[in-house]
Structures are given as C-alpha cells and as structure tokens.
Image (spheres, rainbow, N blue to C red):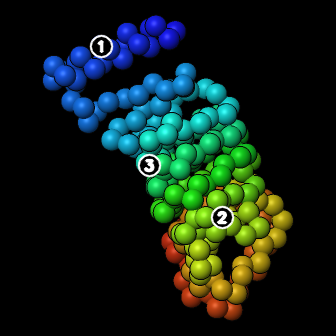
Amino acid sequence: MKRLTRILSMILICAILMGIIPNNSIYVLAAGENFEIQDGVLVKYNGSDSKVSIPDGVTSIGSYAFTDTDVVEVIIPDSVTVIEESAFLSCRKLRKLSIPYSVSAIGDGAFGLCDQLSELKIDKGNRHYTVADGILYSKDMTELICCPSGKRGSISIPESVVTITGMAFWYCWYIDKINLNSNLENIEWGAFNGCH
C-alpha cells in the first residue's frame, strides 16, 4: 500500500509539474482515509472509518464535507480556523468532537442533524467561542451559536445572551423546554427550525 501511494504521489507531482493538473485542484489521500482537500479546504471526506483525524495543514472544513457519513469521532487539528456551514450536517452517529483554539468562524448549521452529539467541547484557549453545558456560545456569551441536536431535557438561556443565531437549535428534537431570558433581542432566521 505504501509503495502504491508513493507511485501515485510521484505521478501526481509529475502531472502538476507538466501542467496537466493545475495545482489548485489537488486532492489528497491521507493516512489511509479519503480526504478531498483543495487549497487547504477539506472539501469532502469519502472514507468509512468511525474515528477520523483531519490531516494537519487543513485550514477549513468545507460546507457538507462530512454530510451523511458514519463518523463517530472527529479530531480537528489546530491548523483549522473555519468550520463552514453544514460541515457535519446529518452525521447521525457523531458523538465526539472538540473544537480547537484556532477556530475563529463557525457557519450556521455546522452540526445540524447530528442527533447523537449531545455536547460540544472547545479548547479553553479559543478566543472566539466558549461552551457552557455543552452548548456553543460566542466568547462573551452574548450569542448562542449552536445547541447540539442530541441535547436532551430543558435548557435555560443565560441572561447574557442577546442573540440566538440562525439554525442554533436546528432539529433539536430531544429538548423538552427552552427558557428564554429577558435580555434576548434577536432570534435569527431558522433558529428553531425542526424543533418539535
């Protein structure tokens, strides 16, 4: 397998040098798993492993990159700064994911329909986001960004929250009750889409 990977790598390098394949459309096969990576963006994960480590050097997890895969755990490297909208949409088996300190932007619905994901975790050194009771907030706790779809029971939104962002409670089927606070000013489009 290693020999085949080396041969394919050499062919790919030769093709790039000869101008047959433009270097901005390179797709990478890494660590025995299929990752389509273009200009630092993980465009698509095509593998079937339950535990996935995204390769170092990836700077962005693209929209729909993991959609409908059977991943259970995803390890995100510190090189990632952006998780685009719907990046993990409908990862029905995803249970464990930790956001590194390097992430500075997370798109709407990034973790939508991940109904086994009951809590998000984040590196305490992250300057843009924080997690309280498994729910993702802006660092200053004024915006509720994402409640994982697998969250259960009732939720009380902290008094500091003034905005619930778009798709924040997207398909949170298992929540019985949400207690809104008196300081809430904005509920963005689709914040409670798919809730019962």
Closer to the N terminus: mark 2 or mark 3? 3
The nearer-to-camera label among 2 and 3 is 2
Q: Cα distance, mark 1 to mark 2?
A: 43 Å
Q: Cα distance, mark 2 to mark 3?
A: 20 Å
Residue 63 visible at all: no
Does 23 sit left or right of 54 as displayed? left
Quadrant of residue 118 within the rendered picture: bottom right
In the image, what residue type sits under mark 3?
Ser
In the rendered view, tell whether residue 6 sits above or below residue 171: above
Q: Which circle marks residue 37 in the picture?
A: none
The x and y percentages for residue 7 are: 37, 9
Find numbered disc 1 in the image and state the secondary structure of the residue it sits on: helix
Find numbered disc 2 in the image and state the secondary structure of the residue it sits on: loop
Front residue (pair 148, 15):
15
The nearer-to-camera label among 1 and 2 is 2
Does 109 sit left or right of 50 as displayed? left
Front residue (pair 83, 113):
83
Residue 81 visible at all: yes
Front residue (pair 79, 162):
79
In the image, what residue type sits under mark 1?
Ile
Closer to the N terminus: mark 1 or mark 3? 1
Q: Cα distance, mark 1 to mark 3?
A: 27 Å
Residue drawn at point x = 54 percent, y = 83 percent? 186
The nearer-to-camera label among 1 and 3 is 1
Q: Badge 2 is on which residue?
A: 124
Q: Which circle marks residue 11 in the picture?
A: 1
Front residue (pair 120, 148):
120
Q: Badge 3 is on which residue?
A: 60
